[in-house]
Amino acid sequence: MSLVIVGSIALDTVETPFGKVNEVPGGSSIYASMASRYFCKTKIVGVVGEDYPTDILLLLNDNDICTQGVEFSKGKTFRWKGIYHDLKQAETLDTQLNVFADFDPQIPENYKNAEFVFLGNIDPALQLKVLDRMKNPKITACDSMNFWITGKKEKLINVIKRVDILFINEDELKMFTGEKNIYKAAEIMEIYNLKLLVIKLGEYGALALNKDLFFFTPVYPLKKVIDTTGAGDCFAGGFMGYLAGQGKFDEMTIRNAMVYGTIMASFNIQDFSIEGLKNITKQEIRDRKEKIKRSVFF
Ligand code: AMP
């Protein structure tokens, strides 16, 4: 089954303790789609400006990602600038929405029947428009970040009320609920009737929670991490890609999706931008899965 992803398409300038890159491919939908395409047919929705390098879109197409839903608009591409002091949390130095400021997402006809939809980190007003314009997806999920939690919380709540799965990192969950204990915070989220809450715990792993499930996955252990930008998007991309590839949302599929999400994030953080996601083999994915599996077997 196929997966439609909406999110930012960005030119990122990022500094980490291991170096600096200028105006490289980034944005939630780029990261998520480069992760999900290993598991399912992936189609993205978004907007770029006249300055966006077309070779990035060609690279996506070469990786079997459909870009028919990407609009070229007059103006400049979305830009994000961030610095990591310790690779845990980026400090945002600059966000320029540019062409995203008045983007009205048009969904191509051949996207509308997709069974799985991932609303990547972007203005929740755009996430809502995409939801409205899809026909009848089987499973929908959304992700967000502090920028929108502080800037557009009411709209974001409207998105959360309508999706099945919410991906959120620990700090954002605490910020969103005003509660410091993650399990109490998860309880507060029950009012939104999500089918699944996925809490990302950074270098420690991720938790999936609902009334029947409490599942934790550790991370794949890496001795060198270069740049964590997009880790959350790759986690969600791997997760949603696996669900769409299997066409299911049962407990075993969710448990496996958590591990595939973790694996795709681990490849991403080994290099800047989308470099770490480019040439992953099926065998490498299997090897990482085996290692994570053994780490929790007792
Ligand atoms: P992550 O590290 O998973 O939070 O994702 C980082 C990516 O999110 C970068 O490639 C940025 O271009 C993109 N990004 C940063 N700020 C925003 C924002 N306010 N809205 C949408 N995307 C953003």
Image (tube, helix red, strand yellow):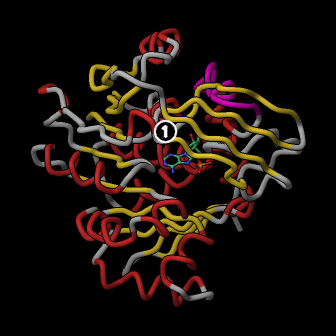
Is most of the magenta stretch helix, strand or loop? loop
| Residue 108, quarter of the rendered image | top left
Q: Nearer the viewer, residue 293 or 189?
A: 189
Q: In the rendered view, would you say 116 is above or below 151?
A: above
Residue 197, percent across and down? Answer: 43, 69
Residue 71, percent across and down? Answer: 30, 23
Residue under circle 1? 32
| Residue 140, quarter of the rendered image | bottom left
Q: In the rendered view, would you say 59 is above or below 149?
A: above
Q: Is residue 49 magenta?
A: no
Residue appearing at x 72%, y 40% in the figure? 269
Residue appearing at x 44%, y 88% in the figure? 187
Residue 18, percent across and down? Answer: 89, 37
Residue 296, percent across and down? Answer: 69, 63
**131 to the left or right of 100:** left
Q: Is residue 277 magenta?
A: yes
Amino acid type, residue under disc 1 in the picture: Ala
Quarter of the C terminus within the rendering: bottom right
Residue appearing at x 14%, y 44% in the figure? 133
What segment is highlighted magenta in the picture?
271-282
**209 to the left or right of 287:** left
Instruction: Kindly tell me whether mark 1's CB lies below 8 Å from ligand 1.
Output: no
**203 to the left or right of 69:** right
